Amino acid sequence: AFQTAFSGFNVTIWLRSEGSIERAQPKIDRLKNIYLKTLEAMKTNPQAYCRGFTDKQNLTDDEIDELKNKVESGYENLTLTTSYEEAGKNADLVIEAIAEDPEQKKAFYEELSKHLPEKTIIATNSSTLLPSQLADFTGRPEKYLALHFANEIWKNNTAEIMGQPKTEQKYYDEVVEFAEAINMVPLKLKKEQAGYILNSMLVPFLSAAEALYANDVADPETIDKTWVLATGAPSGPFRILDVVGLTTAYNIVIMNPKASDINTTEGKIAAKLKEKIDAGKTGVNAGEGFYKY
């Protein structure tokens, strides 16, 4: 949402309650500060350049200041609301980013469909669910597809775009154009794949790390250190989990029926994640997950 506002679009964020708005605002404030600080750093450090800001490198100070102005105007123009009517009115595109729970998504679509004009395209940002599972609940399956972002998209500017059998090509193409308009690189999938491209590789990696932790093979810091030292990667799996968010990780693992049995690896992973979530340690946005921020 923030990247889209920064790119000059009118953006409304729909949230379930006033409490959700109160929790969302600090996240938006944090993003604003990250964008501004990163842009300022680009004046003296070429390594601070982020592809999501602009495809032009070696910017002048004036050009960077123009981008900082876009951050400020995008921030001011973001609207947060609990009203379906306000959020849906005249919308060209809705990006749904509800937790990985099919029932919650279905309920959201069924209510949302009452408040959207005919033209609106709906995209899900689901990490693991197939859009074909949910398409009919939107009331416009021909205008429904998946648009999945990476984390820290101002740096890692990927947008995976995945249709489902009922998606019409022209709406798929419009979402590709939208991704380009917000400085993302559209990664076009030819068919449905649970986990898209990125998470088809990432989830097994993170699950392997969680299993090592859940089965008391090693602690998260040691597991991360092993991966970083051995591969040269900038982050280990538990740093990545903090960025993804532990609630999302938990929702993914409990989809596996084995997670209901505490004696299984999946059950142990779920229990350890739930313990952190219950303590409010849900990741970077909360200030603490496996690490403190």
Image: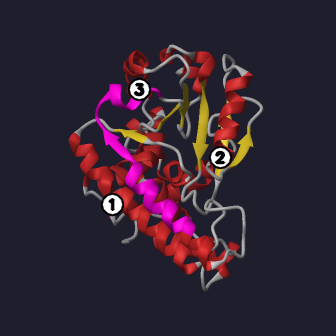
Q: Amino acid at mark 2?
A: Ala
Residue 166 can be seen in this image: yes
Q: Which residue is mark 1?
A: 286
Mark 3–mark 1 Cα distance, whole angstroms, equals 32 Å
Q: Quick check: is 69 in the magenta stretch? A: yes
Q: Quick check: is 253 in the magenta stretch? A: no
Residue 20: percent from left, percent from top: 27, 44
Up the image or down, 239 lies above or below 89; here it is: below
Q: Amino acid at mark 3?
A: Lys
- Magenta stretch bounds: 66-90
Residue 231: percent from left, percent from top: 69, 72
Residue at 22%, 41% (x, y): give it: 18
Q: Nearer the viewer, residue 180 or 212?
A: 180
The disc placed on residue 181 is 2
Instruction: Identify the residue at the far bottom of this view.
Output: 44
Label 3 crowd (10 A; few <14 / some 14-19 / many >=20): few
Prevailing SS of the magenta stretch = helix
Instruction: Identify the residue at the far left of this view.
Output: 19
Between circles 2 and 1, the one closer to the viewer is 2
Q: Which residue is mark 3?
A: 89
* Secondary-structure class at tag 2: helix
Residue 64, located in which quarter of the rendered image? bottom right
Work out whether mark 2 precedes mark 3 in sequence or the reverse, and give the earlier one: 3
Between circles 3 and 1, the one closer to the viewer is 3
